[in-house]
Image: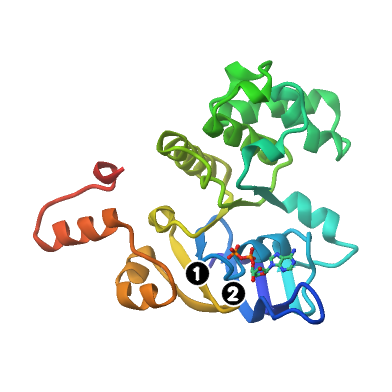
Amino acid sequence: MRSGLVEFRNVSFRYGENEHWVLNDCSFTIYENEAVAIIGHNGSGKSTIAKLMNGLLFPQKGEIIVNGKQINAETVWNVRQDVGMVFQNPDNQFVGTTVQDDVAFGMENRGIPRDDMLKRIDNTLTSVDMQRYRLTEPHKLSGGQKQRVAIAGVLAVYPNVLIMDEATAMLDPKGRKEIMRTVTDVRQNRHLSLITITHDLREVVEAERVIVMNEGKVWDESTPRGIFAKKTELRSIGLDIPFVAVLSDELRKAGVPITHEALN
Ligand code: ADP
């Protein structure tokens, strides 16, 4: 049986004493080497979950366990190494003047020896297919390329979990596809758990399991197919099934063989 890598145990969180509870007694587990999508309408608490997972925020109630350790002031530095995050806006994630400087940044903070760093830069840029851009200035890259570099920077510190927080939201369809492909490859090659946080149900198709958030609680957990079967209920919590999923469902019912690739 796969063991739990990230576990939320009865977690409640609010941003201030007079604010509403964004998460309210929320429990779920992400397992090793699993691809999970966390979905919910805007404001349902998804980004807050991401920030709690790598110790940018701490819950007022309950506990969060990452790789066997409860997140607290003492463990937070190790936890941040275990849980890498890529955010929505690629332009906000760059600190280096070249692609390779940028990938090096997270490692420099952790005192990784230079020889090892150079190997990791080479290795991670190759895994996101950006090796030939290693001396390029980041602002000259497309949105999809920038996100691939951001992914390389995260992978270079060898996390167990990669969180993509609306990481394709600002990309055009080509950039979006690039990132989805990169992330699928990386997950297979590096045995990572992947958590995709999104309000875009097209990204759910790639996941093995889907956690649906509503009003600070886990509303449902299922396979993408199980989730898509609840069209009407999803609409009632502000989520619309993508046209492509409805189409594939109808074609399947009509006995037309259809592959996933055909819909992408
Ligand atoms: P989602 O990612 O699902 O859109 P968020 O986690 O960003 O949801 O937000 C959940 C709720 O928390 C929203 O009501 C939002 O207004 C509130 N919120 C988010 N960030 C802050 C903050 N820094 N201060 C106060 N409230 C916040």
Which is more N-terminal, label 1 or label 2? 2
According to the picture, the residue beneath numbered tag 2 turns out to be 28
Tell me the amino acid under the disc marked 2: Phe
Percent x, y of residue 146: 60, 32
Among all residues in the image, which is located at the extreme front? Answer: 18
Q: Find residue 57 and report its image quarter.
A: bottom right
The residue lying toward the viewer, choosing from 129 and 200, is 200
Residue 81 shown left or right of residue 45 in the figure? right
Q: Secondary structure at mark 1?
A: strand
Q: Find residue 64 and report its image quarter.
A: bottom right
Q: Is residue 215 above or below residue 189?
A: below
Q: Find residue 28 and report its image quarter.
A: bottom right
Percent x, y of residue 123: 64, 27
Tell me the amino acid under the disc marked 1: Ile
Q: Answer yes or no: do the residues labelled 2 and 1 have beta carbons within 8 Å? A: yes
**Count of residue discs:** 2
The residue lying toward the viewer, choosing from 81 and 238, is 238
According to the picture, the residue beneath numbered tag 1 turns out to be 211
Instruction: Say if residue 43 shows up in the picture.
Output: yes
The residue lying toward the viewer, choosing from 238 and 213, is 238
Answer yes or no: disc 1 within 8 Å of ligand 1.
no
Answer yes or no: disc 2 within 8 Å of ligand 1.
no
The residues bearing labels 2 and 1 have C-alpha atoms spaced at a distance of 8 Å
Residue 168 shows which numbered tag?
Answer: none
Q: Secondary structure at mark 2?
A: strand
Percent x, y of residue 232: 31, 76
Instruction: Say if residue 122 shows up in the picture.
Output: no
For the residues carrying marks 2 and 1, which lies nearer the camera in this image? Answer: 1
The residue lying toward the viewer, choosing from 168 and 77, is 168
Q: Is residue 76 above or below residue 147?
A: below
Q: Residue at x 72, y 23 (%)?
A: 100
| Location of ligand 1 given as a quarter of the image | bottom right
